Image (cartoon, coloured by chain):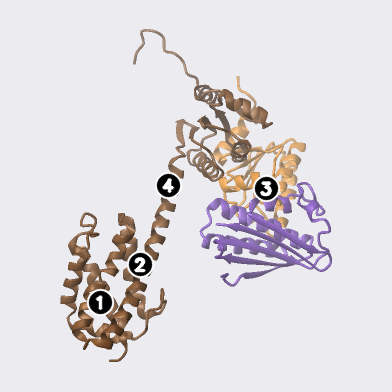
Chain colours: A brown, B purple, C orange
Amino acid sequence: MTNPDQRILHSLERDPSRFLDVWLGEQAASGTMRRDLISEAELRTQSQAFLSALIAALRSGVPFEGGSNHPAWSGVRAQLEDLSRQRAQRGFSFSEVATFVFSFKQPLFSALRESTDGGTELAEASWEANVLLDRLGLYTIEVYQRSRENIIERQRQEMLELSTPVVKVWDGVVALPLIGTLDSERTQIVMETLLQRIVETGSTIAIIDITGVPTVDTLVAQHLLRTVAAAQLMGADCIISGIRPQIAQTIVHLGIDLSGVTTKANLADAIQIAMERTGMRVERQAPGRTP
Amino acid sequence: MTATPDTLPIHSEDDVVRVRHAVRRAAVELGFSLVDQTKLVTAASELARNTLIHGGGGEARVERLDTPRRGLRLVFEDRGPGIPDVERAFQDGFTTGGGLGLGLGGSRRLVNDFSVESTPGVLTRVTATKWK
Amino acid sequence: MERIPILKLGDLLLVTIQVDMHDRLALTLQDDLTTAIVAHGARGVLIDISALDVVDSFIGRVLGNIASMSRLLSAETMIVGMQPAVAITLVELGVTWRHVRTALNVEQGMRRLRASLDGPRA
């Protein structure tokens, strides 16, 4: 038993269940334990699984080198990945995630002190344990970071999609009220969503209302024109409504040609045109005839 | 860095269709949106046709990229007569093959990075890349 | 040789493209359709491209030409079912059609074609 890794293994194997209790106590006392986000039973299961995986990996005798891809460590990696992902989703902070691994140090050092004769042997084993746990800790944080980035990206996508509410106004007529600044990426999603909904609803007329769009520059205008052209290729006509006076001025000053597109000052006028084109008519009821 | 590319010969119209399929497969694997897949496949179709008609045949390489970002790179090479005036060939309406002349200029609009290197009579290489 | 079938429905011709279009096939369709318009005295042509996931500039041009040729032969062309991704790509590519009418699906296309062929009813 000269290999320091084997000393760590030896100290863990002596009494794994007592070790688990001490470690759980350490996690609970760390002050970063989120009892509101994870139950004691769940934490115990996770800790137990990690401890077993670690013992199995140490038994293989293969050292863990930064993010080691060696199959001997796949169990440990899988445990840490599940844990990081789960905690990232539940909203744990960096330090609350890292505590899981770093709180392992204190109990491990105590166990090493008990299982070695002290002196050089203890010093070597402690150093080795320190290095191993730091690497595992870093690995955990990396996975946590990646999971967080994935979550942010997904939320961003969802937000982009939510900001494109294509509503059915009437049989064969859909409307898309646009609110906020249109950048290139958002416009592309808007365009795709609108065209998709046109197909799904079999709508021959789509109204794009830009009342809530603060500015229209050349790029946005180009995207709008392309959307109109693409809809035409598919067999639907677009009406652009909600063109405010300043926007009308900008469009003319920029030399953007919207002559091929039906434009209306407000949404009501656009809906009326759409109804006429689909063969509908809105009429005021004769007085005295209420439904 | 980059996985081994698919290399496909372009010597017939059926080969052009095969290039489209290979590009579609790679674009789906890389997780491109349906619209981006369509743009990539369409660009591939334009460029493969160019290689066949103007280059007298050649080959296409489909490369999956990981760095600096995930993406798909299409490389078309032929040893045909080449393109003497590359800038002019980009203009819409420029054609020597009796088409609409949207081949090069049009494909450039469908991808993010686009380059043409041509040494007439030696090698013409068109590279089109779309980032995820 | 591979061919795309042309169905005759009264004075209309219906073409459903369900195969991968390569250039020769597109040109064969152009020949077959113009021949069929004259042979049957067709007044309308409906081309369903909903199964096509790629339309490049060549195929786009052939479809546009079919419409222009049909018009010379007194038939109207309606292209139906273009997928959104294909439409976006064609616009970016710069393809424009002059004599083509479009509809979302065969049913709408048929209705529009009939309406314009039968003229406005009193």
Q: Name the residue nearer the viewer: A223 or A170.
A: A223
Q: Are marks 2 and 4 in contact (CB under 8 Å)?
A: no
Q: Amino acid at mark 4?
A: Glu
Q: Residues within 10 Å of mark 2 (few under 14, many from 20)?
A: many
Distance from disc 1 to disc 3, alpha carbons, whole Å, reads: 59 Å
Q: CA distance from mark 2 to mark 4?
A: 27 Å
Please give the name of the residue rendered at 73% of the width and 66% of the height, measured from the top-left corner: B77
| Residue situated in front as seen by the camera: B104 or A172 | B104
- Asked if badges 4 and 1 are on one and the same chain, I answer yes
Q: Is residue A206 above or below residue A12?
A: above
- Amino acid on which disc 2 is placed: Thr
Q: Is the C-beta separation of discs 1 and 3 under 8 Å?
A: no
- Tell me if residue A168 can be seen: yes
Report the residue marked by disc 1: A52
The quadrant where residue C87 appears: top right
Viewer-nearest of discs 3 and 2: 2
Whether discs 2 and 1 lie on one chain: the answer is yes
- Residue C98 position, x and y percent, is 71, 37
Q: Secondary structure at mark 4?
A: helix
Residue C22 visible here: no
| Same-subunit check for callouts 3 and 2 | no
Reading the image, the residue beneath label 2 is A140
Which residue is painted at 25% across and 75% down in the image? A51
Residue under the image location 33 percent in, 81 percent down: A128
| Mark before the other along the chain sequence, 2 or 1 | 1
For marks 4 and 1, the one nearer the N-term is 1
**Image quarter of residue A220:** top right
In this view, the mark in front (2 or 1):
2
Q: How far, Cα to Cα, is label 3 from label 2?
A: 46 Å
Q: Which residue bears the numbered disc 4?
A: A158
